[in-house]
Amino acid sequence: MKPLIEFAHVDFAYGERTILKDLDATVYENQCIAVVGPNGAGKTTLLRLAAGTLTPARGEVYLKSRDLRFLKQRKIAKSVAFVPQNVEVPFSFTVEQFVEQGRTPFLTMFSGPSTVDYEAMRRAMELTDTWSLRSRVFNQLSGGERQRVKIALGLAQQPQLLLLDEPMQHLDIGRQFEMIDLIQLLLHQGIAIVASMHDLALIEGTFSSVWLVSPGEPMQQGTPEEIMRPEILEIAFNCLPHHRPRLLERMRDRMEHAS
Amino acid sequence: MVKELTEACPSTPHGWARQQRHPWLLAMLSASVVLAVLLAAGMGAVRVPIWSLAHQLIGGGSLSTDQRIILFTIRLPRIVASLLVGSALSVSGLLFQGLFRNPLADPYVIGSSGGAVLGASIGVFLLPPISVAGFGTTAMLAFTGALCSITLVYWLARVDGRTPVVALLLAGFAVSTMLSYSSYFLEVLDRDFGTGMRILASWLHGTIVQPTWPQLAIVTAMLVIGLAGSVPLARNLNTLALGEEYATHLGLSVQQTRVAVIVVGSILTAAAVALGGLISFVGLIVPHMLRMVLGPDHVRLLPATALAGALFLLIADTVARTAIAPAELPVGVLTALIGGPFFLYLLRKTKQGVMS
């Protein structure tokens, strides 16, 4: 297995707030990784570092053994596709026009998309089952359709690695299972996947490894069986069953102070 | 459900919607522009029949000397001016809408025209605009003014990489009011109450004053530069519509695109203001109407916007100069009367979140 993305001693902070500290991890070809952790722990940050849109404060991120810092974003975008959680499009682009943007790294300033580009778009839309939606307006799609179209844009980049930021969010259970199917299908196509996941119940059976990020702690990685254990998750998510939840505690404190 | 699709790709009932371009629309617009020019040239105090006009233009000579003088020194320059102004305003509106990711941006609304007027006014008070050098200076200063004001509004209106409608409108309103009234301030400084003041007044009303051919040549050059500059930007604006972070990830140099749009948009605004002053809402109405027909793809919209803008302002200016003859209405008054309600309608639609 060849490494696609390697994090080497990566630190990242937003201003004073340290998000990731001394992160060492590798994404190999054909791997399917779930990034889990409490809100604000740095799941999205980790994906952005891998996509090259954020640069680490210390340490390096390598794409196929080359330092991301010295690669052009266009070049990175041909290997790594980042699918954001929310997209706001101010105009009524059709699905087709939306997916076409995935070809941006392949187009030069004056050339329009060619047959090759249309072929890539079409394949991306067929894999995600969005070909029939191509003349619909993106903003008028349902949550599940929108999610699939966003992934189609990512696939139009013909990447080896797909970074999915909360792909299950706002999906009903039926759409969640469709998404799991789609992820398995993409793995089958030889695309590695790193997805930040909120819903831990959806991880087992699909994802080959789990990265657990929690604030102020080194990242833990392992197979789902190793990580998805109550004693580990309870600490990471700070919800020990025999402890009173912190929120209640703080509220009671505040009320006592007020009275 | 998804899995079945991998093996056998379904045969497509229709091809790409993308390939259904609209060549007929561009052809129709071009034909309408030609027809409108002929009709507009015939209209006015001295009527010139359309057939003798067409005959004259293809090389025959069936017009009287009077008719020819009226045509070539008065009507045609004015017609060409309105075509240039309409085209420049509409395309700069389209560019700014893409930049701000907001269909309500218009060179007038966001204060770019106001900046250009202030710049141009300074030019008028420095050098007489009748001379070529004078007009060139005026146009350059209009460009500088537009560039400064749009940069200021952009900087003021952006919140976390987005431009909320309210912030954009308020910043644009404040800056453009400030700038337009600064132009009035210049009036006071004018000691000889001369041409400068009259030109300034007509700019603030949005009148296309009678231009000379050299002036038109300068503005044509600006329009050509502006349009040529817009062509490579159109695709970038489509990508930018997905938001800055997404566009950056896809390899678009967002900062470079932004600067380019601001510069090209300011050249176009300056071109329009140098001839017509503050003409409002044209950059809003024309791109919006076309978006309803062609969709939001900037690559497709650009040529159509340039043509439709020219057509729109030619019609508006012809109505403005003939409707209450012998008096003349500033065309800016007319576009404000049509554009104002249109703007409010768009604002209301935006509020409901149904944007087109």
Image (cartoon, rainbow, N blue to C red):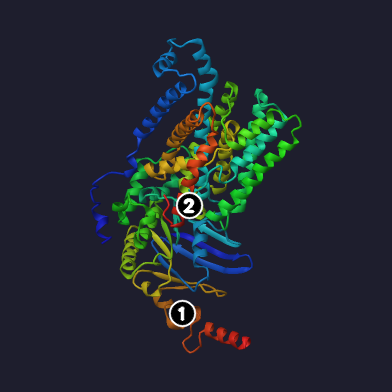
Which residue is nearer to you in this view: A139 or A41? A139
Q: Is residue B259 visible?
A: yes
Q: Which chain's residue wears label 1?
A: A
Q: Does dot 2 land on a helix, a strand or a loop?
A: helix
Q: Is residue B334 above or below residue B38?
A: below
Question: Marks 1/2: CA distance?
Answer: 48 Å
Q: Position of residue A96 (x, y in %)?
A: 36, 49
Q: Which chain's residue wears label 2?
A: B
- For residue B158, what is the image quadrant? bottom right
* Residue in the picture at 48% in, 45% down: B237
Which quadrant is the N terminus of chain A positioned in?
A: bottom left
Query: Mark 1 — residue?
Result: A233
The three-letter amino acid code for the residue at tag 2 is Leu
Which residue is nearer to you in this view: B331 or A226? B331
Q: Position of residue B50 (x, y in %)?
A: 40, 19
The three-letter amino acid code for the residue at tag 1 is Leu
Report the number of numbered marks: 2
Q: Position of residue B165 (x, y in %)?
A: 52, 54
Please name which of the two marks, 1 or 2, marks the residue nearer to the observer.
2
Give the number of the disc on residue A30: none
Q: Is residue A71 above or below residue B25?
A: below
Which residue is nearer to you in this view: B24 or B89? B89
Q: Position of residue B7 (x, y in %)?
A: 24, 55
* Residue in the picture at 57% in, 35% down: B206
Side (left or right) of B196 relative to B292: right
